[in-house]
Image (cartoon, rainbow, N blue to C red):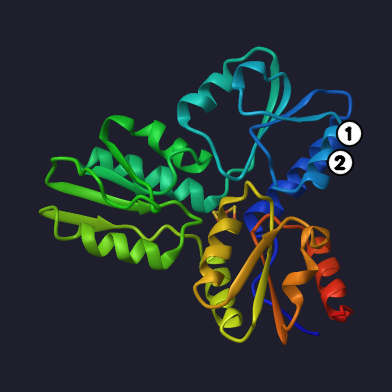
Amino acid sequence: MEVEIAKDIGFCFGVRKAIESLDKVVDEYSKEEIYVTGELIHNKDAIKKYEESNVKFSQNINEYNGIVVIRAHGISDEEREKIKSNHNVKKIIDTTCPYVLRVHYLTKKMVKEGYHIIIIGEKDHPETRGYYLNVKDNCTVIEPSVGIKELPKVKKVAVFAQTTMNYEKFKEIVKELVTEFDETRIFMTICQPVINRQKSVIELSKECDLMVVLGGYNSSNTKKLRDLCAKYTEAVHVERISQLNPEILKGKRKVGIAAGTSTPDWIIQETYEFLKNYTPS
Ligand code: F3S
């Protein structure tokens, strides 16, 4: 079977940096309790491996103890202060992605300049939640899947995107917003690795009969990649190739492989090997 891997695939630099930092912490502080502010990557095997090394993944900041690693998604200022003032916490390692830090900086700056903030992103996603909590008295979140419902009665808005959102959807919503206010400042905050991935899967999807999209079922950027592929061809989202129903491969000439930003390389490789050697019965 013909198989091709998307050009931009696998860990983004932000996730890679966070993993390297956590690996270092595990080596250096093997006797301490280690807390991460939520799953660092959406992969059950990797999470299990860390849990065996005394790492706990939890969003409940009240239970933190020992060493705390802030993951790439970031947290709100209030949460950071709360962790800092917790006497049980000995050290904080902050691996918030620079793209996320940029949005935190800009949203606060624009509030000071008198703008109401509009974030296009998922309300429950930890990244968007962090932005919202910092400027909540001057902020509206628009969920991409819901679209524009109610808008604030203000004159000036500054618009931001969750870093992992679909850039075509962002353009669509922004187009609708610009006619609603006297002044609209637009900040393109979808991160470059995500844009590159989206562009490369669109390209590949157009050439394939099926796209296999790899990533955790709770990974927001993987779900978005699957939806994007599905616009151009048949697409299926699995965590591991063993979860793929082989029936779907029947009659397929070329299969493409895409993966979210927190999918380990070995999962991509095992998928490639399986599909390459697959002979439909
Ligand atoms: Fe950063 Fe974008 Fe990855 S925001 S963590 S480079 S998905």
Relative to 84, say whether 104 is above or below.
below
- Circles 2 and 1, Cβ within 8 Å, touching? The answer is yes
In this view of the protein, which residue sits in the foreground, 191 or 91? 191
Of residue 133 and residue 18, the one placed in the foreground of this image is: 133
Mark 2 crowdedness (10 Å alpha carbons): few <14, some 14-19, many ≥20: few
Q: Is residue 184 above or below residue 218?
A: below
Q: Amino acid at mark 1?
A: Glu
Q: For disc 2, does the CB lie below 8 Å from ligand 1?
A: no
- State the residue at coordinates (48%, 38%): 124
Q: Nearer the viewer, residue 142 or 240?
A: 240
Q: Which mark is residue 52?
A: 1
Q: Quadrant of residue 245?
A: bottom right
Label 2 sits on residue: 49
For numbered disc 2, what is the local secondary structure? helix
Across and down, in percent, residue 71 comes to 63, 40
Judge whether 49 appears above or below 79 on screen.
below
Task: Find numbered disc 1 in the image and state the secondary structure of the residue it sits on.
Answer: helix
